[in-house]
Image (cartoon, rainbow, N blue to C red):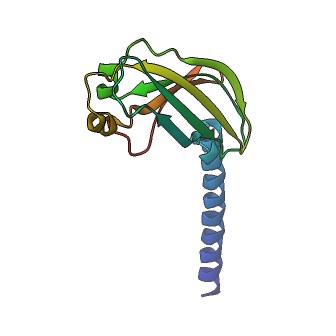
Amino acid sequence: MLQHKKTVLKKQKYLGFLLIIFGIVMILIKVSTGQSEEGRTLFYIGGYGEGVGQFPVKDGLVNYSVTFDNPTKRSFKIYTIEPILTEKAKSILLDKIIPIEEVKKLESEGKVEFSGQFHVNTSDLTEVEIKEMIPLIKGYRVIFNQHEEIIMPIPNSPK
């Protein structure tokens, strides 16, 4: 009986040792492939707004702003942002949208804001139709760090 208990204890020690080794290997694999929780988290859209005149005009100005929040311990360098318009907004766009090419550093746990404008022709629309088109922007194309690109949709925006 005593011999049996020693055998069981030895097996439990080996099993415990193997589980520890397995855990260490899993951690090393996760770290080496860059799949840590923070590694997958980027900055996000923390706030946004857009304004367009409520009355129909041939050359209306749309002002927009977006704030990016960074919940991580890393910082990012944002080079360019460009609004992505809804299909309805594209149909009234007068000129090509010029991306905002302004380098801003998004510090760890910080915020950074960009703002811009573009021109639209709303002369063929009623006030109600203009109101129904909003939001005109459905997301932003962002170029950051080593010229990485990400498309960031605005929450609850039309596709």
**The furthest residue to the top:** 95
42 is higher (above) or lower (below) than 18? above
Residue under the image location 60 percent in, 48 percent down:
26
Q: Which quarter of the picture shows residue 35? A: top right
Viewer-proximal residue, 140 or 14? 140
Q: Is residue 25 visible?
A: no
Viewer-proximal residue, 69 or 128? 128
16 horizontally vs 159: left or right: right
25 is higher (above) or lower (below) than 5? above
Q: Which quarter of the picture shows residue 58? A: top left
118 is higher (above) or lower (below) than 140? above
Q: Is residue 5 visible?
A: yes
> Residue 43: x percent and y percent?
60, 39
Q: In which quarter of the image is the N terminus?
A: bottom right
55 horizontally vs 108: left or right: left
Q: Quadrant of the C terminus?
A: top left
94 horizontally vs 1: left or right: left
> Residue 97: x percent and y percent?
46, 16
> Residue 11: x percent and y percent?
60, 69
Viewer-proximal residue, 128 or 41? 128
Q: Which quarter of the picture shows residue 91? A: top left
Residue under the image location 30 percent in, 21 percent down:
123
Q: How many marks?
A: 0
Viewer-proximal residue, 117 or 85? 117
Residue under the image location 66 percent in, 51 percent down:
24
Residue under the image location 30 percent in, 26 percent down:
87
**The furthest residue to the bottom:** 1
> Residue 62: x percent and y percent?
46, 27
